[in-house]
């Protein structure tokens, strides 16, 4: 039994051992505190490897091509940011590049490294550092927003020219689905239990300090 | 729940924001670092209320030029046309795609405004020590945190329109200044959501329980 404080309301409570597929919610604010899924780490690793491959394809192959009155142009994901830079909107270019390329790549690559490193516990301290970075990148990784943005952009352009989706587009779509699956299957607390402690040794858990059980469902 | 509800801070325990480990700092004034992951421990996010206020006020100010200034400038056969965000929504609606028009309207106009108002409401209630609707207020915070990224939609639309429509000398599209302000609004509101500490919502309730319970 693990004692934790709810990250949303700080209520002290115990998380009882959960059955497979079970979920524990905070007894006060109902935030989901813990879930238990079968082999979360192996499954997430497989999904992360697939996502990394999809990401490489999505970023190297053309996203879409356009032809109008005999002229053609095509773009990649980073091409969208690059053109913004050339057209004089550098700040926008940097943020677009960060949210569409750097954050998704960072999130998946850090996660991949973490999941590989903890296969032989205890994993060294830097694994925890990388997991923290991956968490930091997560909200800024906006591939799904970008896909919807491309859809709207295509609709706007479709009146002016013929637009052809490229391989990069399909790979980006696959990446969006894989990242959603990673977020569902990944349980970071499994990782923290396998990482070496920052202060050198792992003291006993604080299981005797709280009195309030979480509502397990 | 029949037993008393105790917040961790009340009994001298601090929860690590990164790995969720509970620690009992020897010195309440200086909680130090998490023994497991090394993150600096805080009872509540530092200056949470002030930072969040500053960020949403800045976002509210930038929201005006973001909507007034053009986001795209289209040059075709010598003539130039400017489009604001609302102009883009009207264009989508007029060309027969009301679902896309609605998506862009919600993502670009309503979500940023809704986030600013929602965070403002949370800040005011926290500062007044309100104990009502704590449950709903937590849900509002979760929604704000979850939905915020979708307002980046219009920035991506503009980036890919600009990237694709470069058929000089026939036709070209340039980004306008509005897109910069708009992006600043989105980034500031996302940072504001991250700097707000939802535990503050419940602190007033814990306080009251201590005195009356």
Image (cartoon, helix red, strand yellow):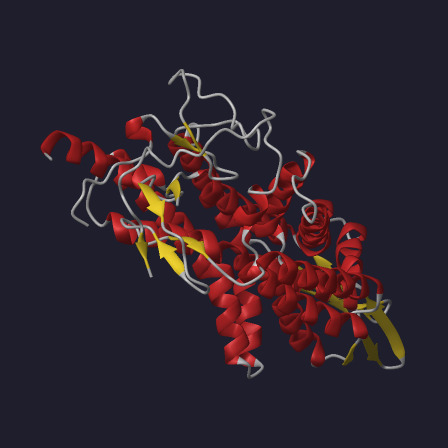
Locate residue B155: give its quadrant. Answer: bottom right
Residue B32 position within the rendered picture, expressed as x and y whole percent measured from the top left: 49, 21
B64 or B50, which lies in front?
Answer: B50
Q: Quadrant of the C terminus of chain B?
A: top left
Compared to residue A112, the image places residue A150 above or below, namely below
Quadrant in the rendering for residue A120 = top right
* Residue for point 48% across, 37% down: B17
Q: Is residue A178 left or right of residue A190?
A: right
Q: Is residue B84 visible?
A: no
**A131 sits to left or right of B80:** left
Total marks in image? 0
Q: Position of residue A56 (x, y in %)?
A: 80, 61
Classify A102 as above or below A56: above
Q: Position of residue A73 (x, y in %)?
A: 85, 71
Q: Residue furthest left?
A: B212
- Residue A126: % across, % down: 69, 35
Image check: B186 left or right of A162? left
What residue do we see at 60% from left, 40% from top?
Answer: A132
| Of residues A13 and B142, the one drawn nearer to the viewer in this rendering | A13
Could you tell me which residue is drawn at 78 percent across and 80 percent down?
A164
Position of A137 with respect to A81 (left or right) is left
Q: Nearer the viewer, residue B81 or B112?
A: B112
Is residue B46 in view from this perspective?
A: yes
């Amino acid at each position: 039994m693990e004692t934790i404080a709810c990250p949303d309301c700080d209520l002290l409570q115990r998380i009882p051992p959960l059955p497979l597929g079970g979920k524990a919610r905070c007894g006060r604010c109902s935030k989901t505190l813990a879930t238990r899924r079968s082999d979360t780490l192996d499954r997430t690793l497989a999904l992360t490897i697939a996502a990394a491959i999809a990401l490489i394809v999505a970023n190297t192959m053309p996203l879409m091509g356009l032809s109008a009155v005999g002229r053609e142009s095509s773009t990649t994901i980073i091409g969208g940011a690059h053109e913004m830079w050339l057209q004089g909107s550098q700040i926008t270019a940097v943020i677009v590049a960060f949210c569409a390329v750097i954050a998704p790549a960072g999130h998946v690559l850090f996660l991949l490294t973490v999941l590989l490193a903890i296969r032989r516990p205890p994993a060294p301290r830097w694994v925890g550092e990388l997991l923290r970075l991956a968490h930091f990148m997560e909200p800024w990784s906006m591939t799904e927003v970008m896909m919807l943005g491309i859809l709207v952009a295509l609709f706007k352009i479709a009146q002016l020219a013929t637009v052809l989706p490229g391989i990069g587009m399909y790979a980006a779509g696959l990446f969006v689905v894989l990242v959603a699956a990673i977020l569902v299957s990944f349980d970071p607390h499994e990782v923290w239990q396998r990482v070496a402690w920052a202060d050198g040794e792992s003291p006993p858990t604080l299981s005797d300090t709280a009195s309030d059980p979480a509502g397990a469902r | 729940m029949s037993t008393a509800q105790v917040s961790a801070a009340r009994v001298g325990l601090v929860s690590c924001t990164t790995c969720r480990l509970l620690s009992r700092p020897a010195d309440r004034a200086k909680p130090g670092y998490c023994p497991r992951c090394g993150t600096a421990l805080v009872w509540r996010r530092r200056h949470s209320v002030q930072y969040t206020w500053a960020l949403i006020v800045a976002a509210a100010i930038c929201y005006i030029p973001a909507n007034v200034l053009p986001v795209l400038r289209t040059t075709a056969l010598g003539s130039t046309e400017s489009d604001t965000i609302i102009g883009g929504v009207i264009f989508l609606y007029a060309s027969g795609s009301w679902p896309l028009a609605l998506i862009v309207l919600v993502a670009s106009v309503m979500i940023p405004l809704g986030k600013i108002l929602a965070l403002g409401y949370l800040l005011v209630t926290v500062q007044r020590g309100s104990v009502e609707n704590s449950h709903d207020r937590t849900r509002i915070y979760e929604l704000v945190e979850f939905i915020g990224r979708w307002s980046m939609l219009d920035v991506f639309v503009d980036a890919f329109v600009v990237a694709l429509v470069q058929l000089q000398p026939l036709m070209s599209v340039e980004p306008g200044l509005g897109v910069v302000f708009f992006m600043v609004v989105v980034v500031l509101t996302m940072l504001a959501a991250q700097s707000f500490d939802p535990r503050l919502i419940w602190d007033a309730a814990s306080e009251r329980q201590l005195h009356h319970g």
